[in-house]
Image (tube, rainbow, N blue to C red):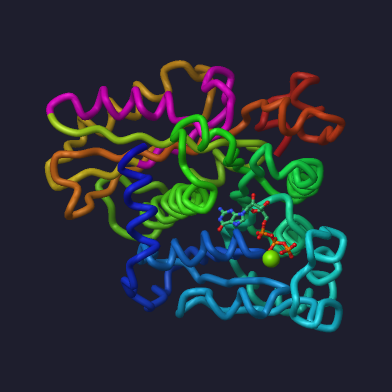
């Protein structure tokens, strides 16, 4: 976790420019940031040098769009409604902004196989517009993965809005991966709020970058699109867990930290699926990667669909970094207060994910 915090904070000061080339891959992947938080995550993803995905920043706030990293396609939504001034915390306005500019969103996701949507839940644009983006992407036949943050408890009025936003996203997304900002505070105490946002962006961006990389670029172990589809389809609510380890016991250390660093307060037990992404230096062996994957998932349902990928990162010599996206988890504190969902109801009746597809 300390490594992530350091990396997030130092990245905010760096002006590192990433490769802008979009690799024309067979699998078309789009990442769409919606609203201020979503766009900051997207800028971080761009700085990480993500390859193999098209990036779009959607916002009703023209000022915030102007600070989005270069190489990201910017789409101003709802200019006729907000005059480019943002939605002021009203998700209903955010929804309308996306509806009036539906055509631009349709063009962005046109032909995509896989669409990631990043947004911070609790404000106006991200909360209201992200479900519309998910709906449009779904209508066009994409696998839709929403990666969203849940507000800090001190954001009070935003919590209810965030719950509603998540309920709406679940309608149209294959999986909604939630990063609870409150877990960040527990895992890294004394972190000021602005730095916590950087860490949230770092974790979300790394999860997307790792996944896009192992799908589109030659890796030590590739994850293919069919794997992602298998884990994410009807994955419903999911979480991210991250961990690192160094030296001789790097596998055990990493596994231990992944299990502790869950960004949503749920257990691995009972999870229905997981995608584990392992990054290591040139010294990463296949045996270590397999062992890490096995140890991380040992508490999960034996029928869970688990896929893993591994990639060599040149400056990771002697260390391992793992990002696990775990799907099909149950989080009553976030999704259980009156926002039921058809997929969840089917699960309660005992239908398997396969039957529900
Ligand atoms: N990951 C991340 N989350 C953020 C950031 N800034 C704010 N958030 C979170 O995201 C939630 C929504 O805030 P914004 O994204 O700024 O809101 P918006 O979607 O732009 O909505 P309006 O400004 O009301 O139109 C907040 O309640 C925070 O919890 C950020 O930089 N990164
Ligand atoms: Mg905003």
Residue 244 picture location, percent across and down? 30, 35
Q: Quadrant of the C terminus?
A: top right
Ligand 1 shown in quarter: bottom right
Residue 20 position (above or below residue 153): below
- Residue at coordinates 67% horizontally, 26% vertically from top-left? 330
Q: Nearer the viewer, residue 91 or 193?
A: 193
Magenta part of the chain: 248-277
Please identify the quarter of the rendering in which residue 351 is found. top right
Quadrant into which the N terminus falls? top left
In the image, 258 versus 276, the foreground residue is 258
Tell me where residue 114 sits by quadrant. bottom right
Which residue is depicted at the point 63% across and 64% down?
36
Residue 153: x %, y % from top left? 68, 37
Which residue is located at x 68 percent, y 26 percent?
A: 352
Residue 51, percent from left and from top: 38, 66
Is residue 78 visible in this depiction of the protein? Answer: yes
What residue appears at the point 49 percent right and 50 percent down from the top-left corner?
204
Is 261 in the magenta?
yes
Task: Quadrant for residue 356, please give it.
Answer: top right
Q: Is residue 231 above or below residue 23?
A: above
Relative to 322, does residue 300 appear above or below in the rendering? above
In the image, residue 297 lies at what x, y percent? 43, 23
């Amino acid at each position: 976790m300390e490594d992530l915090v350091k990396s997030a904070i130092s990245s905010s000061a760096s002006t590192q420019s990433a490769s802008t080339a979009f690799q024309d891959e067979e699998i078309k992947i789009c990442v769409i940031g919606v609203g201020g938080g979503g766009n900051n995550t997207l800028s971080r993803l761009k700085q990480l040098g993500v390859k193999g995905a098209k990036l779009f920043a959607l916002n009703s706030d023209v000022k915030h769009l102007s600070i989005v990293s270069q190489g990201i396609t910017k789409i101003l939504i709802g200019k006729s409604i907000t005059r480019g001034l943002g939605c002021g915390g009203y998700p209903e306005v955010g929804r309308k902004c996306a509806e009036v500019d539906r055509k631009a969103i349709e063009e962005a996701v046109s032909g995509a196989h896989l669409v990631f949507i990043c947004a911070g839940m609790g404000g106006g644009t991200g909360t209201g517009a992200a479900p519309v983006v998910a709906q449009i992407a779904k209508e066009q036949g994409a696998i839709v993965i929403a990666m969203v943050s849940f507000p800090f408890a001190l954001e009070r009025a935003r919590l209810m809005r965030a719950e509603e936003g998540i309920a709406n996203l679940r309608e149209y997304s294959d999986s909604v991966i939630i990063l609870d900002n409150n877990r960040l505070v527990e895992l890294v105490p004394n972190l000021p709020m602005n730095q916590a946002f950087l860490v949230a962006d770092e974790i979300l961006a790394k999860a997307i970058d790792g996944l896009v990389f192992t799908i589109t670029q030659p890796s030590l172990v590739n994850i293919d699109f069919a794997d992602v589809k298998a884990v994410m389809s009807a994955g419903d609510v999911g979480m991210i867990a991250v961990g690192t380890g160094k030296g001789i016991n790097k596998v055990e250390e990493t596994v231990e930290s992944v299990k502790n660093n869950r960004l949503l307060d749920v257990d691995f037990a009972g999870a229905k699926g997981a995608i584990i992404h392992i990054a290591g230096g040139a010294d990463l062996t296949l045996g270590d990667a397999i062992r890490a994957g096995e140890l991380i998932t040992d508490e999960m349902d034996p029928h869970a669909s688990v896929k893993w990928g591994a990639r060599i990162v040149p400056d990771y010599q002697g260390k391992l970094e793992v990002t696990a996206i775990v799907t099909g988890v149950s989080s009553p504190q976030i999704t259980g207060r009156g926002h039921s969902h058809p997929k969840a109801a089917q699960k309660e009746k005992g239908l398997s994910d396969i039957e529900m597809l």
